[in-house]
Structures are given as C-alpha cells and as structure tokens.
Amino acid sequence: TMARADRPDASEGTRSIRRAVAVLRQVAAAKPGGARLTEVSERTALSPSTVHRILGCLVEEGLVRRDRAA
C-alpha cells in the first residue's frame, strides 16, 4: 500500500485518492478498538499531518468515526 499511495507517475488527484484509500484500508484493518493516527501514519508511510487531514475529511464525509475518548 505504501508504494502505491505515493506513486510518482500518478496525477495529484489520483495520488490523493490513493492516499485516502490507503488510510481507509488501515482503519478497516484495525482492531475493534480502532487505529491510532501514528499507527496509520507508520503503516502508510504518510506524514502524521497528511493522515490527520485525510482522516478529518473522511470523518466529515461520514466514512470514518472519531473516538474523542481515545
């Protein structure tokens, strides 16, 4: 997933979609307790700030739920 998320030959729009999909895959594969931002960042080779922005958008779109207690 890491290599495909940041393929240099992809357009910026395609690269953004690949990054979001990589983040979604990591969230989906997480244990029932969820995934921590740092874990998703490490597993996707994306910076924490990039993962934070992507997760924020996915939350706004209703595709991911954020647990504020964690």
Image: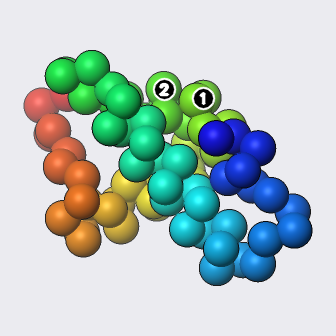
Q: Which mark is residue 7?
A: none
Kindly identify which residue carries mark 2. Answer: 39
The quarter of the picture where residue 19 lies is: bottom right
Q: Percent position (x, y) of residue 4?
A: 72, 50
Kindly identify which residue carries mark 1. Answer: 42
User: Is residue 69 depicted above or below 10 in this figure?
Assistant: above
Describe residue 52's horizontal placement relative to residue 1 as left or right. Answer: left
Identified by mark 1, the residue type is: Glu
Camera-side residue of 10 and 54: 10
Q: Percent position (x, y) of residue 5?
A: 67, 52
Number of other residues with Cα within 10 Å of mark 2, as a class: few under 14, some 14 to 19, many 20 or more: some
SS for callout 1: helix
Describe residue 51's horizontal placement relative to residue 32 as left or right. Answer: right
Camera-side residue of 54 and 17: 17
User: Is residue 70 depicted above or below 64 in this figure?
Assistant: above
Camera-side residue of 3 and 70: 3
Q: How many marks?
A: 2
Q: Percent position (x, y) of residue 49?
A: 55, 51
User: Is residue 29 depicted above or below 3 in this figure?
Assistant: above
Describe residue 49's horizontal placement relative to residue 69 as left or right. Answer: right
SS for callout 2: helix
Number of other residues with Cα within 10 Å of mark 1, as a class: few under 14, some 14 to 19, many 20 or more: few
Question: Residue sitting at 68 percent across and 67 percent down?
Answer: 15
**Are the residues flagged by discs 1 and 2 in contact, CB closer than 8 Å?**
yes
